[in-house]
Amino acid sequence: MLIGNSLPSFAPAPSVAPARPLSSDVSPDMLRADLSPVAAAQEQQADSAASEREEADRPASEGRAGDSEPSPQEQRLEQLEIAELVQRDREVRAHEQAHAAVGGQYAGAPTYSFKRGPDGQRYAVSGEVSIDTAPVPNDPEATLRKMEIVLRAALAPIEPSAQDLRVAALAQAQAAQARVELAELRREEAAAAEQARDERAQARRDEQEQTGQQQAAQSAPNLDLYRRLGELPAPEPRVDLVA
C-alpha cells in the first residue's frame, strides 16, 4: 500500500504484494515493498521520476511576458505563494521521509509530485511511499513483527493522513489475525509436547515392568533338581537275613 503526502495519506502500491500507502496532504504517498529507507541519492531519483507528474502550473511572470513590472501588490501575492510552497515542500518531504525511515525494509523510497512557483522553482506538493502489508506465509510470528513495523511507519508523521490511518487499521487487523494463528499454533505445539511426554512416560513404565520381571525370574530358586528327584521310582524294600 501507499503512504503519502496529499498531506498525509496511504495508497496501494502498484505491482508489489499487498501494500498500503502512507501520505501527506495533497495526494497519497506510496511505500514500495522491500525497499530500504530513502537516502539523499534516492530522493533525487524520486524527484526526477516524479517530475513527469509535475502540475501544469507555470510562474505567473510567464503569463506577463512583455508586460510591465508587476505591481507591489502582485509581488506581495507572489511572495506569499512562494512562502506557502516552501512550507508545503518541507512538510511533504518530512512526512514521506518519516514513513520511509520507520518502514525500513518494508518501505520504498518516497516519490513526489511538484508544482512550479512564481519564481520558477519546483516545489513538492504531494508524495507517496509504498509499504508491503502482505502477511508472511505460514509464519504468524513473523507476520506479527512485520505488522508492528508497518503500523509504526503508517503513524510516523506528526499528522497522519486518512490513507495513513487506513494502512494503520489494516496492519492492526493483520496483526490481530496473526495473534489468533500464533495462539492456535502454540496450543497445537503444547498438545503435541504433552502427548510426547505421555508416550515417553509410558515407555519408561513398560521398560521398568519388563526389567522387574526379568529380575524376579533371575532371583527365583531353581527347583528342577527337586522335581527330577521326585520323578525317580521309589526303591524296592529289601530285607537282609543273617544266619
Image: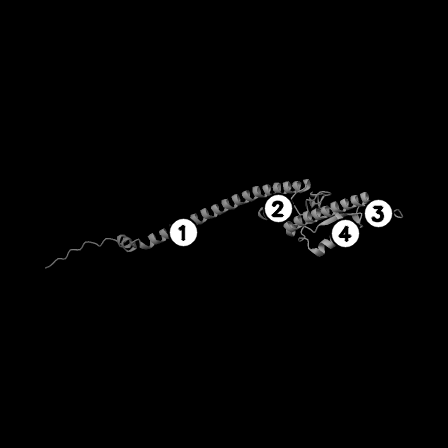
Q: Amino acid at mark 4?
A: Ala
Q: Spot the residue most to the right.
A: 66
Along the polypeptide, which appears first: circle 1 or circle 4? 4
Residue at image location 74% in from the left, 46% down from the top? 83
Residue 130 appears in view: no
N-term-proximal mark, 2 vs 3: 3
Q: Alpha carbon of mark 2 to alpha carbon of mark 3: how far? A: 44 Å
Q: Report x, y in % for residue 29.
A: 71, 46
Q: Secondary structure at mark 4?
A: helix
In percent of width and height, residue 183 lies at: 54, 43
Circle nearer the N terminus (2, 4): 4
Please give the residue where the numbered disc 3 appears in the rendered image: 61
The residue where tag 2 is placed is: 152
Tell which circle, 1 or 2, labels the residue nearer the N-terminal end: 2
- Quadrant of the frame with the N terminus: top right
What SS does tag 1 mark?
A: helix
Q: CA distance from mark 2 to mark 4?
A: 27 Å
Do the residues under discs 3 and 1 have CB atoms within 8 angstroms?
no
Task: Measure the alpha-carbon separation of dots 1 and 2.
Answer: 56 Å
- Can residue 51 be seen in the rendering of this structure? yes
Q: Secondary structure at mark 3?
A: helix
Rendered location of residue 194, percent (x, y) = 47, 46
Residue kind at label 3, given as amino acid type: Ser
* Whether label 2 touches label 3, CB < 8 Å: no
Residue annotated with mark 4? 49
Contact? badges 1 and 2 (CB < 8 Å) = no
Name the residue that disc number 1 marks.
207
Binning the other alpha carbons within 10 Å of mark 4 as few (below 14), some (14 to 19) or many (20 upward) gives some
